[in-house]
Image (spheres, grey):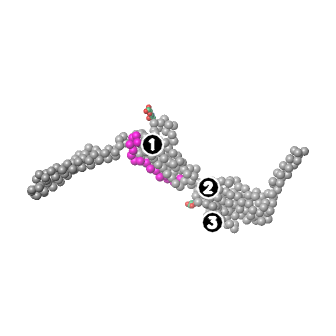
Amino acid sequence: MAIARLVACFVLYTSLGHIPSSFGVILRTTDKTVWANEFESIELTCLIESISTNNPRIEWKKIKNGVPSYVYFQNRIAGDLEHRAQLREPANILIFNTTRSDTAEYRCEVAAIDDQRDFDEILISLAVRVKPVVPRCSVPEAVTVGTSTELRCLENEGFPAPQYRWFHNNEELPQDPKNSPKLVNSSYSINPDTGGLKFRRVRKEDAGEYYCQAKNDAGHAQCPPLMMEVYDVDILGIFLKSFGALIVFVCLTGSICHSLRRGCFHKKGHNENNYNWPAQTDGVDYGDADEGHFRHKSSFII
Ligand SMILES: *[C@@H]1O[C@H](CO)[C@@H](O)[C@H](O)[C@H]1NC(C)=O
Ligand SMILES: *[C@@H]1O[C@H](CO)[C@@H](O)[C@H](O)[C@H]1NC(C)=O
């Protein structure tokens, strides 16, 4: 008996579940979350499951950052979608040429005055994918063997945010060098989210042309290749050290000459002022001698 009653209740319940649809407006969509590629068309579906009213009022609103605006109002496409969209039976909206600014929530609202349940709405979120543009890449021109360095790649337009890949002499670098027999000894690591290519210890073999590619579901773009040279020794360091040594040398000679000259003045210059002139010419000569040392030193570096 109890079971029979339960079944009866269930039958009544399920049939009741269908009844409201006959006297109320009910909307449905095929996709609540819609992805579209920029500059392509997309249709947001607003299907009317049931309705009795002959001429329901249909409206579409766009809600961006919490601010609603009409995109279909009084039987016309309006606002941001004007001249770019069209209403399609029953209440779908077709955007011919999406742009990144169309990324927003869209609400289809249908009012049916002759229905008992005279209003329904449905919210659809649209995300427009944007192709990455050419990323900005930075590759050091010259690095020293054994030092660490980082190559960078950045792209800001793509949506969703792109993933980055690096190429060395036109061959893609695997994310982990351990996965390639050829690169097993390289110390690099790639962060595909940030675009960084880091070397812990640069090797001679790491020299070459590098470029980076930014890629998302909408497409990809890459920067032109840039050359990274790898030197055995730190040329800049040697230059700076030699330059420092040269300055110390010049200062030393300078001060020695100065004290020598002062010594001379003490002996001779005090009584006979005429000696000042030759003494100064002597000073200029010392300067020439310094330059001579400088040339010698610099040619030694080269
Ligand atoms: C789509 O819109 C962009 C500008 O928003 C325009 O450059 C492009 O030509 C349009 N494409 C079509 C197929 O109308
Ligand atoms: C990697 O290093 C090991 C040990 O130094 C060496 O035997 C091997 O030949 C290297 N492999 C490559 C591909 O350079």
Q: Residue furthest bottom?
A: 74
Tell whether position 145 is magenta: yes
Q: Secondary structure at mark 3?
A: helix
* Quarter of the rendered image showing ligand 2: top left
Residue 139 vs residue 31: left or right? left
The reply to whether discs 3 and 1 touch (Cβ–Cβ < 8 Å) is no
Which residue shows up at 23% across the image and 48% down it?
252
What stretch of residues is rendered in magenta?
Answer: 132-147
Disc on the earlier residue, 2 or 3:
3
Q: Secondary structure at mark 2?
A: strand
Which residue is under mark 3? 79
Single out the mark in the foreground, 2 or 1: 1
Q: Residue furthest left?
A: 272
Amino acid type at image mark 1: Phe
User: Would you identify the image quadrant in which residue 209 lies?
Assistant: top left
Q: Secondary structure at mark 1?
A: strand
Tell whether position 58 is magenta: no
Disc on the earlier residue, 3 or 1:
3
What distance separates the C-alpha of mark 2 from that of mark 1?
37 Å
* Residue 199, disc: 1
Disc on the earlier residue, 2 or 1:
2
Which residue shows up at 51% across the image and 45% down it?
191
What distance separates the C-alpha of mark 3 from that of mark 1?
51 Å
Which residue is under mark 2? 127
